[in-house]
Structures are given as structure tokens and as C-alpha cells.
Image (cartoon, grey):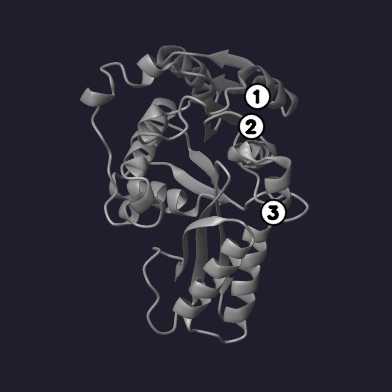
């Protein structure tokens, strides 16, 4: 596996593949890779001739007081894992390569409405940072497709909307969440959990499953279901940020009958902010 740090080198490698008529997939990450990331790489390999994985801890998507400085940086281990699954190219741009004029002077991509709710309400500016860096990475690599995990459900919808609105010619593919045996969604921030917190963490997914089962049985009093779920999480030791039942297509509030719902949640457990979701098909 080769690795490059500059856009120029990235373009040179991709040009060789394009000249050979090969398709290209991009898997954007912030490193500290786990089984969920590797599943994205494997799925990308099934869909394209060449796979690029980017590792870039994007300062623009971290707010004041968030964990940018302490976010795990594990490049050596990450590279070894990507080598083991036969990744074609690792792109590791420094901050000055991505934001050569600095963040204050950077053109910002913002996706309205979707970016302002849920995680966007709790983390102002977060999704503008995500949309901006993903837009830049897509323009740098110009892949045929890019793969993202569905654990970050709102992020996936934001990226899809951005690509559609800006007419970026890339297919955005969502890959199902990879979970531990006890249901906990794989996440780089799970490393923040103490042993005791780790034993409590699967309660988030269990709560989603219980809400999903209630909806499947015909309970449509969503506000009551949300309130009950928050109480369950608090009793389990979480500090819920939000727990909401939304339309799966656009995260709007459900009104009347809808074909597909998604339960989205974010909750703190110690210093870890865990997010998860579960799509509920009613028909």
C-alpha cells in the first residue's frame, strides 16, 4: 500500500488508474480505525477497482471545548490495518494542505435545515465543517463513489444533500453500522469509555430496539416513547443529549402515517458522546 500527503501526488496516482480505465472509491476517515472502517474498505473493494482511504482529523468540525486535541491519533496502527486489507492508497494530508489559507479564510459549505437539528443543534457549525471537508476531499480525489457508515445517520444525509445540491458526480453509499457482540456501535470514541462505562454502553442500542419494537406493534405516540426512552437511558447512567423519532428520508418530524422512520439518539456516558440510530420500516 502506498501513501501520499499532497493533492498533487494524489492526482498523479489517480491519473494512472484512470488511464487504465479503472474506477475509484474513496473512504474518508479521521483515523483511529476499527472494524467499521475496515468494512467500508471491503465494501468499496467490491464496488470499485481502486480504493483510497483518507485520514484527516478535521479541525473545522470540532467546536470550542470539544476533543480535537485529545482525539486519538493512531496512524501507524491505522496504516497496518489498511495494509492488511490491501487498500490501494492512503491519503494523509496535513492541515495546511487542506486549508492552505487557514480556516478563517476558507470557503465554507453549509447544508441548511438538515445541519441545524439534532447533532447540529448540540454542536453548532459541526456539519458545516463536515460538509466543507468532504466536499474538498471529493474534489481532490474525484472518485466514482464514496462510502460512509450509517452510524452517523445525520452526517450521511447531510453529505448526500450536499452532493445533490452541488451536482458533484459521485455516488454516496451508506454501509450498515458494524456492532460489537453486545450491540454497541463501533466508534473511535468508544475508547474514551472506562471498563464500567463500557459495560453500560450497550443500553443505548437496547433502548433503540425497545422503541422500535413498540412502534412495530402499533404505538404511534412518539413523544411518549421518546420520553420513556430518555428516562431509561438516565436510569442506565447516561446523560441524554437527544432521543428522537424522525422521518428516515429527511429527519423531519413525523406527521401521520409514514413508510419509514428512524430513531436517532446521542447520549453522554462519562466523557464519551455516543450516537446511534435504528431505522424502523412500518410497512
Where, by quadrant of the figure, is residue 82 drawn?
top right
In this rendering, position of residue 103 left or right of residue 151: left
Q: Position of residue 138 (x, y in %)?
A: 41, 33
Q: Position of residue 175 (x, y in %)?
A: 59, 50
The answer for how far apart the CA atoms under marks 3 and 1 are is 27 Å
Q: Nearer the viewer, residue 179 or 46?
A: 179
Q: Residues within 10 Å of mark 3 (few under 14, many from 20)?
A: some
**Dot placed on the residue nearer the N-terminal end, 3 or 1:** 1
Q: Is residue 168 visible?
A: no
Q: Nearer the viewer, residue 20 or 77?
A: 77
**Element type where label 2 sits in the image:** loop
Q: Are marks 2 and 1 in contact (CB under 8 Å)?
A: yes
The residue labelled by disc 3 is 200
The residue labelled by disc 2 is 33
**Element type where label 3 sits in the image:** helix
**Dot placed on the residue nearer the N-terminal end, 2 or 3:** 2
The residue labelled by disc 1 is 78
The answer for how far apart the CA atoms under marks 2 and 1 are is 6 Å
Amino acid at each position: 500500500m502506498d501513501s501520499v500527503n499532497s493533492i498533487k501526488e494524489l492526482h498523479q496516482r489517480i491519473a494512472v488508474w484512470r488511464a487504465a480505465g479503472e474506477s475509484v472509491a474513496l473512504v474518508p476517515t479521521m483515523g483511529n480505525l476499527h472494524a467499521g472502517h475496515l468494512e467500508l474498505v471491503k465494501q468499496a473493494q467490491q464496488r470499485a477497482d481502486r480504493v483510497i482511504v483518507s485520514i484527516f482529523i478535521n479541525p473545522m468540525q470540532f467546536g470550542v471545548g470539544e476533543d480535537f486535541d485529545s482525539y486519538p491519533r493512531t496512524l501507524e496502527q491505522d496504516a497496518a490495518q489498511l495494509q492488511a486489507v490491501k487498500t490501494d492508497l492512503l491519503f494523509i494530508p496535513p492541515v495546511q494542505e487542506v486549508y492552505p489559507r487557514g480556516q478563517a479564510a476558507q470557503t465554507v459549505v453549509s447544508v441548511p435545515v438538515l445541519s441545524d437539528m439534532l447533532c447540529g443543534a448540540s454542536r453548532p457549525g459541526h456539519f458545516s465543517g463536515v460538509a466543507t471537508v468532504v466536499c474538498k476531499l471529493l474534489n481532490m480525489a474525484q472518485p466514482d463513489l464514496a462510502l460512509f457508515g450509517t452510524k452517523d445517520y445525520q452526517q450521511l444525509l447531510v453529505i448526500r444533500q450536499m452532493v445533490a445540491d452541488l451536482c458533484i458526480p459521485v455516488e454516496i453509499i451508506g454501509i450498515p453500522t458494524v456492532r460489537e457482540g453486545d450491540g454497541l456501535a463501533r466508534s473511535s470514541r468508544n475508547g474514551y469509555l472506562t471498563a464500567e462505562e463500557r459495560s453500560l454502553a450497550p443500553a443505548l442500542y437496547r433502548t433503540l430496539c425497545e422503541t422500535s419494537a413498540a412502534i412495530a406493534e402499533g404505538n404511534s405516540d412518539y413523544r411518549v416513547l421518546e420520553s420513556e426512552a430518555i428516562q431509561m437511558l438516565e436510569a442506565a447512567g447516561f446523560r441524554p443529549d437527544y432521543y428522537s423519532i424522525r422521518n428516515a428520508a429527511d429527519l423531519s418530524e413525523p406527521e401521520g402515517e409514514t413508510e419509514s422512520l428512524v430513531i436517532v439518539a446521542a447520549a453522554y456516558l462519562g466523557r464519551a458522546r455516543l450516537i446511534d440510530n435504528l431505522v424502523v420500516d412500518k410497512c
